[in-house]
Image: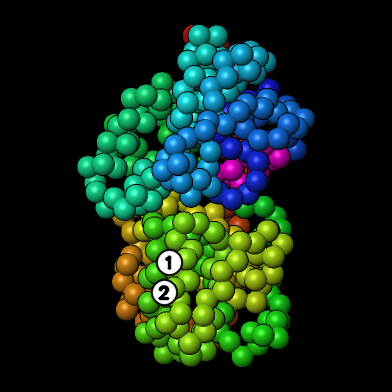
């Protein structure tokens, strides 16, 4: 298949959607597909490069804090790219994709989309994350301006598929994990010298309002082993300075580090416990990666997050925002070392169902279904 991926940001690895898109492109190519991308950033083979939109300072801060940019809807390049493709797959419901969707319809091209932008990603950034009316309005705007033009939508989790059904989305919803690659596997290593006497608890994710790293900091203050726990927050984002200030209350100040893949795998290999506190999340591929390396997770159970689906039992979940319950779960797993080591292997084994090869089979099936339906009409 000749597959065109339309996405606002393809360069870098500072947000989950971009990372997922790059993995999909790489693995679709490995399976013999001819894949091209239209996006902002640097020129490269198989890519149509468009300019980014320059925003007002406030809007730019909101967008860039999510690790994103908006792409200009370059009609000439969109027409060239879409005319080439057998199928066009859209990642984001913004200017580039809206224009591209209209051109694909005009040219009668098969087209699919993916739902990667949760309204709460936007509203938490501006302090309105719990305003249901605003979140519902964003779902409606996305639906009416973009998603209801498609017959097939890729949903990374059952949770987000159910949210779309609840908000009146009419397409066939394909629940397909973004998937993890083969090198995310069970791995254990010795702690570096400066952490040898510490209990290492790690969380991976953007330092933003909806991720709720503050809950973990507060839980450690209440934990039985507070004086021995060293928190590592792997990520960057607008709340970094706020969380650093909160972390000063702990015996061991948290380590904040934005890591490349190799550094992150090394950190996870000597981590004792993985915690994921996010209130809102479509899938949280970082949590699956941590589990695959052989870590027992403790995951926030939120009605706006899919991540608790990865917990094998209630010992690995806590009520979202409840730092006291999180502290109790941390105490349990640190008190029961042998059980934790047994469950580490169970979690690593369970992560096998999220391998990217399975995701590629399913996404190709969705593409072929759209192509066949379009040709039959």
Q: Which mark is residue 242?
A: 1
Q: Is residue 313 left or right of residue 88?
A: left
- Residue 151: quarter of image: top left
Residue located beneath label 2 in the image: 246
Q: Position of residue 12 (x, y in %)?
A: 65, 46
Relative height, residue 6 to residue 56 (above, below) = above
Q: Position of residue 63 (x, y in %)?
A: 47, 43
Q: Is residue 338 left or right of residue 129?
A: right
Relative height, residue 173 to residue 207 (above, below) = above
Q: Give whichever of 216, 275 is nearer the camera.
A: 216
> Callout 1: helix, strand or loop?
helix
Neighbour tally class for label 1: few under 14, some 14-19, many 20 plus, Cα within 10 Å: few
- Cβ–Cβ under 8 Å for marks 2 and 1: yes
Residue sitting at 45 percent across and 76 percent down?
247
Q: CA distance from mark 2 to mark 1?
A: 6 Å
Q: Give whichever of 145, 238 is nearer the camera.
A: 238
Can residue 190 be spotted in the picture?
Answer: yes
- Quadrant into which the N terminus falls: top right
Residue sitting at 49 percent across and 63 percent down?
240
Q: Position of residue 276 (x, y in %)?
A: 46, 65
State the extent of the magenta-drawn residues as a range: 17-27
Q: Is residue 155 magenta?
A: no
Relative height, residue 337 to residue 242 (above, below) = below
Neighbour tally class for label 2: few under 14, some 14-19, many 20 plus, Cα within 10 Å: some
């Amino acid at each position: 298949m000749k597959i065109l991926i339309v996405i606002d940001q393809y360069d870098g690895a500072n947000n989950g959607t971009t990372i997922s898109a790059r993995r999909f492109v790489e693995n679709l190519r490995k399976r013999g597909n001819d894949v091209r991308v239209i996006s902002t950033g640097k020129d490269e083979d198989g890519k149509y490069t468009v300019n980014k939109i320059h925003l007002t300072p406030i809007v730019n801060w909101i967008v860039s804090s999510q690790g994103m940019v908006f792409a200009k809807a370059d009609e000439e390049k969109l027409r060239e790219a879409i005319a080439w493709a057998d199928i066009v797959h859209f990642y984001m419901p913004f200017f580039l994709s809206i224009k591209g969707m209209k051109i694909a319809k005009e040219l009668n091209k098969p087209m699919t989309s993916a739902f990667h932008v949760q309204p709460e990603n936007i509203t938490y950034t501006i302090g309105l994350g719990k305003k249901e009316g605003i979140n519902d309005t964003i779902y409606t705007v996305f639906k009416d301006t973009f998603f209801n033009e498609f017959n097939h939508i890729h949903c990374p989790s059952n949770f987000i598929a159910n949210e779309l059904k609840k908000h009146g989305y009419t397409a066939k919803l394909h629940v397909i994990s973004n998937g993890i690659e083969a090198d995310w596997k069970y791995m254990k290593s010795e702690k570096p010298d400066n952490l040898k006497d510490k209990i290492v608890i790690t969380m991976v994710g953007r330092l933003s309002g909806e991720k709720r790293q503050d809950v973990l900091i507060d839980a450690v203050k209440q934990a039985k082993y507070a004086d021995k726990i060293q928190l590592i927050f792997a990520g960057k984002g607008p709340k970094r300075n706020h969380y650093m200030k909160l972390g000063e209350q702990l015996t061991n100040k948290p380590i904040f580090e934005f890591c490349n893949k190799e550094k992150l795998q090394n950190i996870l290999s000597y981590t004792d416990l993985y915690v994921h506190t996010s209130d809102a999340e479509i899938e949280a591929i970082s949590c699956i990666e941590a589990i695959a390396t052989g870590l027992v997770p403790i995951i926030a159970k939120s009605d706006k997050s899919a991540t608790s689906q990865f917990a094998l039992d209630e010992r690995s979940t806590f009520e979202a925002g409840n730092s006291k319950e999180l502290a109790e779960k941390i105490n349990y797993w640190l008190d029961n070392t042998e059980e934790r080591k047994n469950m580490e292997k169970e979690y690593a084994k369970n992560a096998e169902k999220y391998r990217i090869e399975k995701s590629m089979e399913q996404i190709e099936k969705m593409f072929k279904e759209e192509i066949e339906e379009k040709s039959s009409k």
